[in-house]
């Protein structure tokens, strides 16, 4: 049994259909709230999805949008809304988004249990 940790919960990968579509960690939530406040974007949410490109086939899409699209699934984490296209959920299910600010760099980190192969630079992947 291969298990992954999502938030504070260990989940059997074989039971991936039971995984949440996405989990935002506390640092990511705080940083997103800070960005929305600094850019005067009350009510906006985070679009999380896939886009074609990179040397391995896909890359992550993360951008702010004012409202979800009609077909989107909407998830909320401590007041931060995440908009996801249902077609992308299959490839992103169980992913965790965190934020880190260290001396060598700051940014969002995504852990996606569906990734089968990742490019050397880490910006694109294949599922």
Image (tube, rainbow, N blue to C red):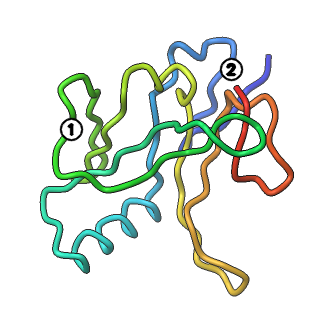
N-terminal-most mark, 1 or 2: 2
Q: Circle 2 — which element?
A: helix
Q: Nearer the viewer, residue 54 or 4?
A: 54
Tell which residue pokes out farthest to the right in this image.
120
Badge count: 2
Q: Is residue 97 left or right of residue 40?
A: right
Q: Nearer the viewer, residue 110 or 27?
A: 110
Residue under pointer 2: 13
- Marking on residue 47: none
Q: Nearer the viewer, residue 24 or 46?
A: 46
Looking at the image, is mark 1 or mark 2 nearer the viewer?
A: 1
- Marking on residue 68: 1
- Report the quarter where the N terminus lies: top right
Q: Is residue 82 left or right of residue 9?
A: left
The image position of residue 54, as x and y in percent, is 70, 45
55 vs 78: above or below: above
The image position of residue 82, as x and y in percent, is 32, 43
- Report the quarter where the C terminus lies: top right
- Answer with the quarter of the image where residue 32 lies: bottom left
Tell which residue pokes out farthest to the bottom in this image.
103
The image position of residue 105, as x and y in percent, is 66, 79
Tell which residue pokes out farthest to the left in this image.
42
**Callout 2: 10 Å neighbours few (<14), some, many (20+)?**
some
């Amino acid at each position: 049994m291969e298990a992954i940790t999502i938030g504070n919960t260990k989940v059997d990968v074989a039971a991936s259909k039971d995984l949440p579509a996405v989990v935002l960690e506390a640092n990511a939530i705080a940083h997103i709230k800070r960005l929305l406040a600094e850019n005067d974007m009350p009510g906006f949410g985070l679009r999380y999805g896939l886009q074609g490109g990179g040397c391995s086939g896909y890359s992550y899409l993360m951008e702010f949008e004012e409202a979800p699209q009609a077909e989107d699934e909407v998830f909320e984490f401590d007041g931060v809304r995440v908009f996801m296209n249902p077609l992308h959920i299959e490839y992103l299910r169980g992913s965790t988004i965190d934020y880190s600010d260290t001396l060598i760099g700051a940014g969002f980190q995504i852990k996606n249990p569906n990734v089968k192969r990742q490019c050397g630079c880490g910006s694109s992947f294949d599922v």
